[in-house]
Image (cartoon, rainbow, N blue to C red):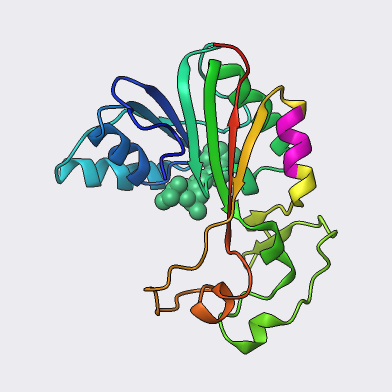
Amino acid sequence: MHFLGEDLTGKRVLEIGCGSAPCARWLAGQGALPVGLDLSMGMLERGLAAMARGGPRVPLVQAGAEALPFADASFDLACSAFGAVPFVADSALLMREVARVLRPGGRWVFSVNHPMRWIFPDDPGPAGLTASIPYFDRTPYVEVDADGAATYVEHHRTIGDRVREIVAAGLVLRDIVEPDWPEWLDREWGQWSPLRGELFPGTAIFVTEKPGS
Ligand SMILES: C[S@@+](CC[C@H](N)C(=O)[O-])C[C@H]1O[C@@H](n2cnc3c(N)ncnc32)[C@H](O)[C@@H]1O
């Protein structure tokens, strides 16, 4: 599926929460003009190291997705693969920021863990099939280090929350894609497994557009 469009040649694309920028580098290989943005210099350094080994090179920017350091309407497309969206407390602000930097008619496509996944423990086996957290509980999941400082924070939003934030940012929701578990994939890793994948979706992809042309 080509959520960002069939022909990416010359398209200015902002990748949000790019990590080591595998998506931005792939987009550059398709003829697009991507910029990768991430909060973590460590992740961007991995991207720089990967580019030094070969392949397309893309500009990388260290910044938070809640205050994008770009002018209004400076991108044709924006995307995120499990990037910043679940990691910011104010994802409504992030939606507004992306809407601001997109040109009218531009598209914003982002993937997150499917909100349904929140209610199940991170266990790929049978224990991961029993709901244990209320879907409506927005209390963030937090991991802390020995000093009590947060090292990982993930914010749950329901499907309805996401739709409301998209609409409030002035964007039009075109689709919510819930990919099936691929039939050929029989491996399990981390929290993912064919056992769970057969029963409920792991990923939700939101396809949105900024009105205008
Ligand atoms: C799960 S990783 C996904 C990385 C990449 N998209 C990929 O598919 O490999 C999430 C990324 O979001 C970044 N991130 C988290 N909060 C952010 C924020 N507020 N602004 C920008 N990036 C953020 C993290 O540093 C991390 O690189």
The reply to whether the magenta stretch includes residue 90 is no
Give the image location of residue 191, x and y in percent.
Answer: 54, 73
Viewer can see residue 102: no
- Residue shown at 63% from the left, 69% from the top: 200
Q: Is residue 17 left or right of residue 50?
A: right
Vertical relation: 1 (above or below) 154 = above
Vertical relation: 104 (above or below) 194 = above
Q: What stretch is highlighted in magenta?
A: 162-167
Vertical relation: 119 (above or below) 77 = below
- Residue shown at 52% from the left, 45% from the top: 83
Residue 35 quadrant: top left
Residue furthest to the left in view is 54
Give the image location of residue 54, x and y in percent.
Answer: 14, 43
Vertical relation: 150 (above or below) 76 = below
Give the main secondary structure of the magenta stretch.
Answer: helix
Residue furthest to the bottom in view is 126
Residue 21 quadrant: top left
Viewer can see residue 177: yes
The reply to whether the magenta stretch includes residue 164 is yes
Q: Is residue 6 left or right of residue 107?
A: left
The quarter of the rendered structure image containing the C terminus is top right
Give the image location of residue 147, x and y in percent.
Answer: 66, 63
Residue 33 quadrant: top left
- The answer to which of 118 and 2 lies nearer the viewer is 2
